[in-house]
Amino acid sequence: MEIFSLSPLLLLSVTGLTCYFLWFAFLSKSLKGPCVWPLLGSLPGLIENADRLHDWIADNLRACGGTYQTCICALPFLARRQGLVTVTCDPKNLEHILKTRFQNYPKGPTWQSVFRDLLGHGIFNSDGDTWLLQRKTAALEFTTRTLRQAMARWVNRAIYTRLCPILKAAQLEARPVDLQDLLLRLTFDNVCGLAFGKDPQTLAPSLPENAFALAFDRATEASLRRFILPEVVWKLKKWLRLGMEVGLAQNLVEIEEYLSGVIRARKLEQEQEDGNNNADLLSRFMKKESSSNKSLQHVALNFILAGRDTSSVALSWFFWLLMQNPRVEMAILTEICTALIETRGPDVAVDSWLDEPLSFDEADRLVYLKAALSETLRLYPPVPEDSKHVVADDVLPDGTFVPAGSSVTYSIYSVGRMESAWGEDCLEFKPERWLSAGGDKFVTHSAYKFMAFNAGPRICLGKELAYLQMKSVAAAVLLRHQLTAAPGHKVEQKMSLTLFMKNGLKVNVQPRRNLSSIVASIVSKKESCDKI
């Protein structure tokens, strides 16, 4: 009787498995993209290429053929709606998702749930009216000259009192340094100063560990790891206080205690100074909103997350590319020297250039440097992939159907490496593609094929501040030092939401020996032109 009673269940199981295998067989034939395996979908390919994920995605999009740059990844148990994720890098699709049908593609419940404990309903973890209100408030602040001046002060202090002495010491002691680590510390100090007016001094000469910085890093990493688990699993682990969820909870307590102290001190300072001290973003939000301490903490954390890793990662890849392209490095040096000669005069001693930071006017003159930075961001965008939730059924411009409740991943890394967008030399580091025919003007490309700063209504508000910070750091380092990769050091991408270098960027620091000859050559050419 037991065997007989089980037979309908056995028959149902066999029928279900058969249907499942037939469904995946159909998917493997009909879907463009990575190979689809029964039960496992595209997971074997993803696991096999885990250490080169972004290139694997680009390879699959490129293999679609022609101008069709959309594929489907089957990720059973990890993705919503039949385990399918639409992946695209077609600029027309990107414009559709990020601008034309903006309301249909929000951050979505998965993203918000993963980051809610850390970022709350801050600007980078919210949608709808909540996002719009914060966006309008922030947009007003980012257009002010006061904020640009505040950024310049923080950046210059970090460069001239911390980064330069550390590099000088490494040069004199003939020891390698991890440039990525130094840049991460520099941008962290800067963004904390800009966000809430307090300097954590992580780039002090001893390179100290900072409790807030460590807690923030660990909380970010733990939040990111939630993405690789089904939501029910990490929520159960959170409830049971297991694994990384325990560390996340502890780090969130440290972050809250630190920021609570910062906010209390800021409010007291504002009361004592009649509200005149508003150079940092936190103080400005305090004046414009009757916000709780919790929401103000999330304001600060959201801006730290956006402003810290992106610029430092971009600069790390920039210096690495310069080491391999001495022609570009020399062109940048020549441009910097030309700008300083024009603004400070040909008779000013070259050594004195090292004591005074770039002015806004001098930074704006560095067109080729901006082109080289943009070319770096095209090839190595700090945020290589991003995703959106699909609210209602939709059809992308290339004809791809995306069902409601599913997700769409747009590959920022891939769009910068497509021949259809950038030509046959798309994999070359070529700053000239950003310059006018005469080479004296910066040429802006479509935001939907140059996605480093996002696009549409959510385009990065701090884009110009990021360029200012990167130009200032690049000019200060290049005028003083020549960097070379430490022998045996291997540069690899770290597979995370931010395109870190897995092993850092170990460099040897040598003095810049040819600066005077570059200046003499520029002056000589200028004198010859004047005579003509």
Image (tube, grey):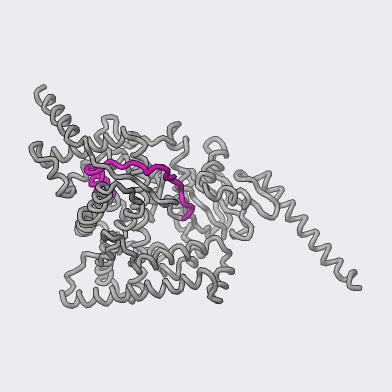
Question: For residue 280, which quarter of the picture?
Answer: bottom left
| 141 to the left or right of 254 | left
Whether 398 is drawn above or below 531: the answer is: below
Residue 487 lies in magenta, yes or no?
Answer: yes
Which residue is located at x 60 percent, y 44 percent? 33
Whether 522 is drawn above or below 219: the answer is: above
In the image, farthest residue toward the top: 532
Q: Nearer the viewer, residue 438 or 425?
A: 425
Taking the image as drawn, is residue 133 in sight? Answer: no
Quadrant where the N terminus is found in the figure: bottom right
Span shown in magenta: 470-496
In the image, farthest residue toward the right: 1
Whether 234 is drawn above or below 439: the answer is: below
Could you tell me residue 128's position as x and y percent? Answer: 42, 64
Which residue is located at x 13 percent, y 38 percent? 342
Question: For residue 482, which quarter of the picture?
Answer: top left
| 261 to the left or right of 382 | left
Could you tell me residue 402's position as x and y percent? Answer: 57, 52
Could you tell me residue 24's position as x and y percent? Answer: 70, 51
In the image, farthest residue toward the left: 347
| 401 to the left or right of 129 | right
Residue 363 lies in magenta, yes or no?
Answer: no
| 251 to the left or right of 69 | left
Taking the image as drawn, is residue 291 in sight? Answer: yes
